[in-house]
Amino acid sequence: MSVDKISEAKINLLDALKDIEHQIKSLSQQDPLFGFISSKYIKCGRENCKCKQSPKALHGPYFYLRLEPEYKFSKYLGRKVPSSMKDRISVGSNIKELERKRKKLSSTLDNIDYF
C-alpha cells in the first residue's frame, strides 16, 4: 500500500471517528438507559388459583428493567412498559453500538500507525 493511500485511509478513519464522537455526544444528551427489559410470568400466593396447578396459567407478563453493570439491578415496571422507557433504552443501545464501532476504528487506526 502506498504512502498516499495509507494517509487517505488514516484521514477517512479520523473523520469517521470524529463523526461517531459527535453522534455519541448528541445521543448522550437524551437521557439514555443502559440495560434491557425482561418479562416474567409468575405464580400468585392464592391457594385456589389455577396458576398453582398449571404452568400455562401463570400470571403476567410483568415487565422489569435490568440495568448495567452486569444487569444485577432490576426494577419492576408493571404490566405495561412506558414508551419513554423504551426510547431511553434504545438510545442507550445506540450509544453502546457506536462505542463498539469507535473501538474498532481506533484499533484499525493503531494498526495503520504501526506500519
Image: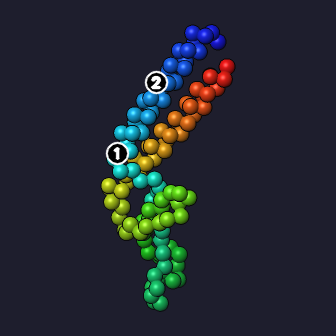
> Is residue 39 visible in this depiction of the protein?
no
Residue 92 in the image, given as x and y percentages of width and height: 43, 48
Name the residue type under label 1.
Gln
Residue located beneath label 2 in the image: 15
Work out which residue is located at the far bottom of the displayed protein and give it: 47
Residue drawn at x 36%, y 56% as measured from the top left = 85
Q: In this view of the protein, can residue 35 be seen by the observer?
A: yes
Mark number, residue 29: 1
On the rendered image, what quadrant is the C terminus found in?
top right
Residue occupying image coordinates x 61% and y 10%? 3
Q: Where, by quadrant of the figure, is residue 62 drawn?
A: bottom left
Disc 2 on helix, strand or loop?
helix
In this view, the residue in front, 67 or 41, is 67
Tell whether label 1 touches label 2 (CB within 8 Å): no
The label number, if any, that marks residue 1 in the structure image? none
Q: Position of residue 51 (x, y in %)?
A: 48, 80
Which quarter of the rendered picture does the N terminus lie within?
Answer: top right
Amino acid type at mark 2: Asp
Q: Secondary structure at mark 1?
A: loop
Give the crowd class for mark 1: few <14, some 14-19, many >=20 residues within 10 Å: few
Rendered location of residue 46, percent (x, y): 45, 87
Q: Looking at the picture, does residue 9 appear above or below residue 98?
A: above
Compared across the picture, whether 1 is left or right of 70 comes to: right
Would residue 49 appear left or right of 10 to someone viewing this image?
A: left
Which residue does the image show at 45% across and 53% down from the upper left?
34
29 in relation to 110, above or below: below
Q: Say which residue appears at 50% left-offset and 57% top-offset.
A: 68
Image coords of residue 42 (percent x, y): 48, 75
Q: CA distance from mark 2 to mark 1?
A: 22 Å
